[in-house]
Amino acid sequence: MSFSSFSKDYGERAFTSVENQFIAKYLPEAGGDAVRAYLYGLYLCNCAKTFGAEDAAKLLKIDYPTFVEIFSFWEECGLVQILSKEPLFVEYLPVTSSAGKPKPLRPEKYAQFNQDLFRLLQKANKDLSPYDHRKLLEFLEETPMEHQAFLLVVEYCIRKDGEKLQANHILNKARQLAKNLKFTTEQVEADLADFNNREKELSRIFSMLGIYRKPQESDYDLLDRWLEGGMEIGAVYACASSLGTGSVKTLDSRICELSAKKIFTESDAKAYLAEQEELASLVFKVAKKLGLKTPNPRPYIEEYAVKWLERGYDEESLSLLASLGLRLSYGFAELDTLIDGLYAEGIVDHESVREYCAARDKELRLLGRIQSICGVVKKSQATLDMIAAWRSWNFSDEMILEAAKRSESASSPLPYMNKLLSEWKRLGVFQPSAIPERPAATSPARGNDFKSEAAIAADEKSDRERFYAQRRRMAMRHAERARAIAEQDADFKEAEKILRKGELELAKATLYAPETLPEIQARMDAAREKREAALSRLKLSDRDFAPKFFCQKCSDTGYKPDGYPCDCYKK
């Protein structure tokens, strides 16, 4: 390294010399990017700093493969010598009159071709740089493709790319055809006709999916993969139609699903998709009955719906069981467990399911009466099974309620009821009049024996729970009475039915038929107006359907949402 160097300011004021012969001979033949790359490389020859080819391409905003191709062009012209391509490293050669001439192209050979090419480009409002034009002519020099065939490729790319047309796109398509040994006008025309058909097919698919962009090369590749895999184009249309709206990726997933199930024909695809739509409808109905929202029904179809239907349960039976599940706060998993139990017992046909639900309904009604007497009693499958067991002991509802009355002061009413009924069964007592008097010492609430502080606290807790249960019942009765009055009105009842049905239709339409959403929404808006008019006529409002609790902090439970006792509970 020399002991001296230029200052930064001196370097910035220096000049890069360009030989006049380059400007006279080569600049007219080269495109703008080629000239920019040559000049920047020449400038870097005089710089001491290290600057790679990829960095230069990035700075000039030229993609790297094109950057390498440009210097291959300059090498053919004899202006540089490529010493390495990976990484790219070039040596600049002097511009002389005896060497470094562009590859000769006879103008008369391409006169008609150039006229036809410029005519096509003018129609498309496009223009090619001299460098790009030369690359097209060099391709024709290197391959036996007919000029008219190449012009068909240009016309195809203009129609496909529009304003985004680039010479590289034309060359890539032409090279692809040449690779497949398609050089004549007839061969190229036949191949492009196939592409035109694919374009029509993709346009129809895009229309079904609500996609408004032009098909890209990756879309053509996907369509080719589907059809080469044996899928009929009608089956592809059926999949796109079933989605309503979506992406090409979503459609690919649906078609892969059909392929995995060996479904390739249009008729088989339509049958399968119709079956899936019915299963989705079933899932939506069951979810609605359970009081749940399921934006995507597919996971529930595979895990639950298919199994239930295969076991012989019909849609009406599943709706009955889901309605029962709503009253027990069930989700899909709990409902599935219930159905597993029923299947094990042979309760499958609609009549047996209806009888089971009717029996459970009676048990739930009886449980409600027990809750009104004893206070807080958990509503669960285990509690209903206990009531069913009492009835299997031949106890009437009257006897069960009598046991509830005698257990209302107990800290745990259900176990005490079970103990009483078991004792009456042992004694053969099945009528209230035959119940023997219990000694005072055996009363669940009080006795002459000493009570510990824990027992006293437990009794106080039981008293408070009954107190709050009675408060909640009063609030609930007010709401239930308002609801009963409203449901006796025909207009209100009809509007409620439309709104419930509309929510299900909205969920389905979002996935399968978005074009029907405005119609469904308009129908629901009209039903809401009708419902409001009916409530106004009855002098009611939606607030009347909600319980009016004495304590708003705890909703008459004694405990706040954070789990701590409410102020009213402490009082």
Image: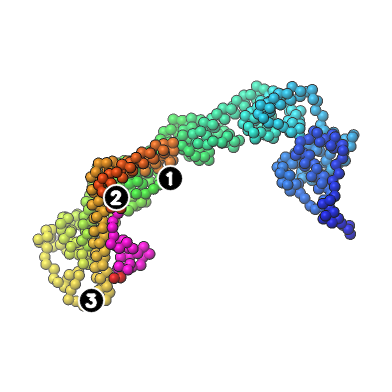
Left or right: residue 271 versus residue 197 is left
Residue range corresponding to the magenta coloring: 546-569
Name which residue type carries label 2.
Ser
CA gap, disc 3 to disc 1? Answer: 58 Å
Q: Crowdedness of circle 3 by 10 Å Cα count: few (<14), some, many (20+)? A: few
The residue pinned by badge 3 equals 451
Which callout, 1 or 2, points at the residue further toward the start of the chain?
1
CA gap, disc 3 to disc 2? Answer: 51 Å
Residue 354 lies in the magenta stretch:
no
Residue 567 lies in the magenta stretch:
yes
Which callout, 3 or 2, points at the residue further toward the start of the chain?
3
Q: Crowdedness of circle 1 by 10 Å Cα count: few (<14), some, many (20+)? A: some
Say if residue 71 shows up in the picture: no
Left or right: residue 409 versus residue 309 is left
Residue 68: name its quadrant: top right
Q: Residue at x 73, y 47 (%)?
A: 59
Image height check: is 454 above or below 470? Answer: below
Left or right: residue 197 versus residue 418 is right
Q: Residue at x 19, y 54 (%)?
A: 392
Residue 55 or residue 212, whichever sits in front: 212
Which callout, 3 or 1, points at the residue further toward the start of the chain?
1
Residue 296 shows which numbered tag? 1
Secondary structure category for the residue under label 1:
loop
Residue 541 shows which numbered tag? 2
Q: Are marks 1 and 2 in contact (CB under 8 Å)?
A: no
- Asked which colour scheme the image uses, the reply is rainbow
Q: Residue at x 33, y 63 (%)?
A: 553
Q: Position of residue 120 (x, y in %)?
A: 68, 26
Q: Residue at x 26, y 56 (%)?
A: 476
